[in-house]
Image (spheres, rainbow, N blue to C red):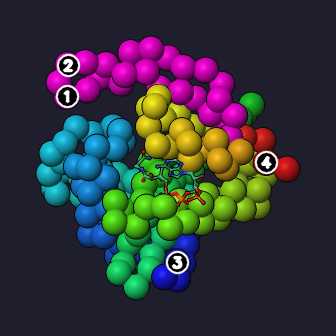
Amino acid sequence: MTIAVRVLDAQAATDALPGLAALLADAVNTGASLGFWAPLRPSRALAYWHDVRAEVEGGSVLLLVAEDAGGVAGSVQLELCGKDNGAHRAEVRKLMVHSSRRRTGVGRALMQVAEDESKARNRTLLVLDTRTGDDSESFYRALGYSPAGSIPGFVREADGTSSPTTYYYRHLA
Ligand SMILES: CC(C)(COP(=O)(O)OP(=O)(O)OC[C@H]1O[C@@H](n2cnc3c(N)ncnc32)[C@H](O)[C@@H]1OP(=O)(O)O)[C@@H](O)C(=O)NCCC(=O)NCCS
């Protein structure tokens, strides 16, 4: 299936809100660690994306969406560091691919465009963190990201247990 990745401006983000909310709910409700506990209510997912839309409008965040014939298949964001000493870096956040579209190259396609957009803005260092042991670790390693270390107890799970997170980075050539 053909995948198209777009960078959304604020208007396009508004138009995509329902699809993005459904994507986030699917990811969280199938076990992804994206900051929310399952079950994620649609209204909460929508409120989250409204906040992201405001960040897009303010210019601090780039929002990318991957679409195929079935609609929104995945998304990722780049938070552009606003510090004087961080104008060369960005944080990759909320990468997610719909559970029905995984292992078909959607994540790789999203990250390729995210890296191209970063380089076009002279953001040549990407950083991120992800729950230790998740599939996302294999994904980021496959894409050339280096582990920088883990923080125990970073994630508090709904059942009261906790999980570590692992930081990754990549210098873009
Ligand atoms: C992590 C995630 C975004 C990967 O997206 P994806 O579209 O399935 O990944 P791709 O198909 O582009 O995979 C690219 C490569 O990553 C690696 N990879 C991806 N998923 C993997 C898995 N479950 N196990 C092992 N390796 C995996 C493989 O090397 C793969 O290449 P291959 O399929 O040719 O072997 C997806 O699993 C997801 O949405 N997870 C839930 C949300 C999440 O955890 N996000 C990270 C938060 S920081």
How far is disc 3 from disc 4 in space, using C-alphas? 23 Å
> In the rendered image, which residue does mark 3 sit on?
3
Mark 1 or 3 closer to N-term? 3
Q: Amino acid at mark 3?
A: Ile
> In the rendered image, which residue does mark 4 sit on?
172
> In the rendered image, which residue does mark 2 sit on?
160
Give the secondary structure at mark 4.
loop
Q: Are marks 1 and 4 in contact (CB under 8 Å)?
A: no
Q: Are marks 2 and 1 in contact (CB under 8 Å)?
A: yes
- The picture places residue 57, in percent across and down from the top left corner, at 47, 60
Mark 1 or 4 closer to N-term? 1
Q: Amino acid at mark 1?
A: Ala
Q: Nearer the viewer, residue 91 or 29?
A: 29
Give the secondary structure at mark 3.
loop
> In the rendered image, which residue does mark 1 sit on?
158
User: Is 114 placed left or right of 9 in the picture?
Assistant: right
- The picture places residue 114, in percent across and down from the top left corner, at 63, 59
Instruction: Decide: few, some or many residues near mark 3? Use Cα within 10 Å; few <14, some 14-19, many ≥20.
Output: some
Mark 3 or 4 closer to N-term? 3
Q: Amino acid at mark 4?
A: Leu
Q: Nearer the viewer, mark 1 or mark 4?
A: 1
User: Is 48 placed left or right of 154 in the picture?
Assistant: left
Q: Are marks 4 and 2 in contact (CB under 8 Å)?
A: no
How far is disc 3 from disc 2 in space, using C-alphas? 38 Å
Residue 173 among those drawn in magenta: no
Q: Magenta stretch?
A: 145-169
Can residue 9 be seen from the camera position used here? no
